[in-house]
Image (cartoon, grey):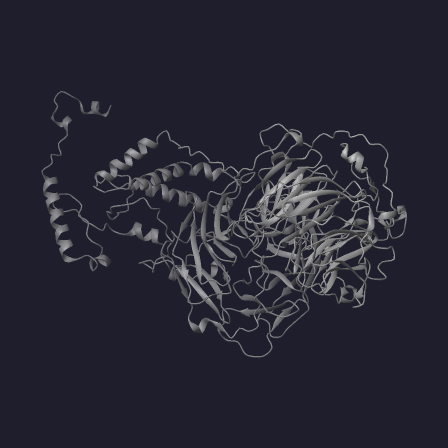
Amino acid sequence: MAWRFKVSKYKNAAPLLPKKEDWVSDIKVGAPQSCGNHIKASAAFIAFNVENRGGGSLGIVPLDYKGRVDPSTPLIHGHSDLITDFDFSPFDDGILATCSTDANVRVWHIPEAGLTESLANAEYSLPQFDKRVENVLFHPTTEFLLTVAYFDTIKLWDIKHEKEIFSFSGHEDQVQNTSWNGNGSLFVTTSRDRTIRIIDPRADKVAYEAESHKSPKDSRVEWLGHSERILSTGWDGSRVREVRLRDLRNFSKPYKIQGFDSSTGILMPLFDVDTNMLFLAGKADVSIMYWEVTEKEPFLTEGLKHNGSVQTKGACLVPKRGLDVMNGEVNRVLQLTSNAIIPITYQVPRKTYREFHSDIFPETHGYEPSTTISQWLGGANVSVKTISLDPAKRPTPKFQIHRGPLSKREEHKPPEVVDVPVPAPRSWISNGTENKPISEVRPTLSKPMVAVKEMVEETDEDGSSKLASIRKAFESRSVSMDEKMVERRWEEVRQEKTIQEEEKENVGEQLTVRDSSRVIAAERRKTFEQRMVSVDDKPASPTPRRATVTRSFRRICKFRHLKGTPGHKSTCIENLRDLSRTTPGECDGMAANSEFVVLPLSGPGGKLSVLKHKKGGRQPDGVIPSLMNTANVMDFAFDPFNEHTLAVACDDGKIHLWHIPEGGLTQPTNEPNETFMDIGSADKVTILKWHPLSAGILAAACGDLTIKVWDLHSQSVAITLPSHPDQIFSLAWSPCGRYLATMCRDSHIRIYDPRHCTEPIQTGNGPVGVRGARVLWALGGKYLVTVGFSKVSERQISVYKATELNKPCNTVVIDISPAMLIPFYDPDSSTLFATGKGDSTIYAYEIGTDYPHLFPLSHHKCGSVHQGLVMLPKIMCDVRQVEFCKALRLTSSILEPLSFTVPRVKTELFQDDIFPPTFVSWEPVMTAAEWLGDTNRPPRTLSLQPSDMLTLSESREQQSPVSQPNSGGHIRHETPPFLKGMVPNEVRQTQHKLEESMSQQMNQVSKTLEQDRMEGVDSTEWED
């Protein structure tokens, strides 16, 4: 658990885009089509494809070159056709190998001073091949070894002695990419036959092979340094770009698959072994993604993405020897566009860069080969000796290596090496087999196995007796029942038996549970027991009940037929202008209390419009009175205990507190009453949540993936929860105010007890989609509700027990839509409303403790699409009209009130069965100091009953019996007046005849008991 919250040194590495004059501009790249990256860099030079009608050419510029490239700049005119790939030697910054569509491979030497004239004669040319050459790659530990891939063949060539060392032609189609492991003993390939292979060139065999990606389109592969992990990019069967991670200990099945989008450009992986930073640059994309590769869950952690404005033609990483380490530059990505090279620096922020920060710059691979060709062929596996990046330890200021032309070079002879076997790291992927040497293992290509979970039928000790009683009761009424309905009722019986136990469950300790939930559970139990009473039994309750025949076991929801009614046109606010359509995904887009509603406006400055929603009408033209925050607004929320206080979170790390005048805003203002900012962190604030019971406590989710609990009275951060592994989508306080639930991009739900522990006390799996999610508490804090996306972009709602977050109790799929569902929960009615921006339907469900926990209600369909929805406080509901929820709905230019009511006959009575005592959410029960001092107080409640209304339960007790006994002493039930017009006359006559016939038969039944006819027996003996 602790590892998940381990802080990475590079999690805040930010991409820095230089000014345009610092680009390498005015180049002509054209549209090269190959499996290469079209740009490579050494510690001294940058090589890139150049459009040339006369054949394949490369442009060469110094690594630190800035500005425009003169059209007369010398080039490498190396081939008669397109240059498909090229690579710099890791041991000489001036040695460059190229391959081309003309089936030639050439090696070039670039002078230390750069090109002074165009090059056409190579240092060395390999014999021409019979097919187009797709890849060239230098060996990572041995100098002069060059890997060449053409069509279905891989060759290893000794360019110093001009001879071939190894050849493999086992691919069934074109080879697309190759990569060596850290010590140079194995290399991995991908090809169009959708197979990934690990080849041992010295043993002349395939060590491993497996299915790479479903699509035969272009794919890339990268061996992750000295580890046993391999990363590949490609497309799945649905043409969705994906990244797959594999481990040699379970090579046939990837342990991580990360999907992205359906773009047509291949993702080019750029991996830094020293920092585990992975950059994914898609061809024709305008953005470059940054991920950090980890050895444990979640394996891939997303960092800050570079969002550019021009399409990518190619990309590469600058070697570590070429970085500006004294400015915190941990990596530099060179983005090749159609007419420029953009150097994108990834910098780790530090307070000062006066000294060398060795903690973020570990030792990197050096420039001296570790083995000779003969040693490597003899079986030596030695990694390259590492060097320090500290400028004080550099042999030369620029840290560049130039060894001269290839023809004058002598093979470097390192000291004799002994291949010491290194024990394999502890396996963290269990495959049920013993680890074997690579040369002895060659698994066949197989499809992943799908585990099938066995379905075990659960039994109950008294389940049979319950089922028998259910059948007996309903068979006596001659009611036909479906077998599935019986089983469903059986499940409800088991759920009813455990209600008492569920009420005692809590998160870590006993949570505050409202008495109304127990009353509801008692009512359900009482209703079920009354269903089971035989027709001849007398009702247990003194209240007369109309005889009904229940023909199904469907759960009775009091809000099943809720009705949504928009307000009259005179109550709507019209002519709303300049509304923002681009609010962040973590923001609900609107905020309201009993007086005001806040709407974000478009344009710079983070403007917010504040309106009095009780006053309808048309907004005047002209300047819109607004709150100007001077920075982009990320989220905003009203103080629940002060209707005139609004908290606003901005992307500059500040939290503004605004006081809204009594009459509302009359003119724009840019001076907040108070401003809070954590001096130790300047990251943006993304989410704000006020404490439900304590005044002055505000939880804020920050861009550095931490959660900070502010004490606004002391203007300080009282509690800081450690960083999440990924972006925080949502957070919510529990009704009792003790716990805080979060929903993260890593698809995990976490529950914190912030006053006692900074680590989560509960963790579980949430929605797997990465577009966004929401979490909220339900049923007095015993359950959690999440809203998010599935793997196939289906919007879904899930219910979890707060004590069991491993899997949801139930999940309901809504539809497929890109809009995020925003949930709203009414604790009094246990009703969940959910809708998204651009939707025209408001989905409604009742949350229950019994299966399936999500009971669909009548969804409200609006006449037009809406841009947002916000619920108003419960105190604003008109209980005389049986209005249990009130909302504001925003369209493109109109804000209209929306009323949710329940159809009832006796509206003159207060419906106390659907209006339990509500929370007093507008008054705090404790101060911030008391809450921080570990004080817990239950929330206060208030009855919504008007003083001049009689409750429904009281009216039933005062009612006289609805039926009188007839002459035979039997009860005759009459049709209620409001149903008489709905029953045909023929049916009423038939019913009357049946009742008369039944009464006559009952009069003939003897009422004398058997003991009345016995003689010589005392009456008291029958009581035994």
- The extreme bottom residue here reads 621
Q: Would residue 223 be seen by someone viewing this image from the given angle?
A: no
Q: Quadrant of the C terminus?
A: top left
Q: Nearer the viewer, residue 492 or 809?
A: 809
Q: Would residue 571 be seen by someone viewing this image from the given angle?
A: yes
From what the image shows, is residue 612 above or below residue 42? below
The percent position of residue 519, horizontal first and vertical second, equals 41, 45
Q: Quadrant of the N terminus?
A: top right
- The extreme top residue here reads 1016
Q: Nearer the viewer, residue 67 or 102?
A: 102
Which residue is found at the position 44% from the left and 59% from the top? 842
From what the image shows, is residue 612 above or below residue 651? below
The percent position of residue 651, horizontal first and vertical second, equals 67, 60
Q: Nearer the viewer, residue 691 or 135?
A: 135
Q: Quadrant of residue 204?
A: top right
The percent position of residue 17, horizontal first and vertical second, equals 74, 61
From what the image shows, is residue 177 above or below residue 313? above
Left or right for 614, reference 30 = left
Q: How many marks?
A: 0
The percent position of residue 365, horizontal first and vertical second, equals 80, 43
Q: Nearer the viewer, residue 277 or 410?
A: 410
Left or right for 399, reference 731 = right
Left or right for 812, reference 200 = left
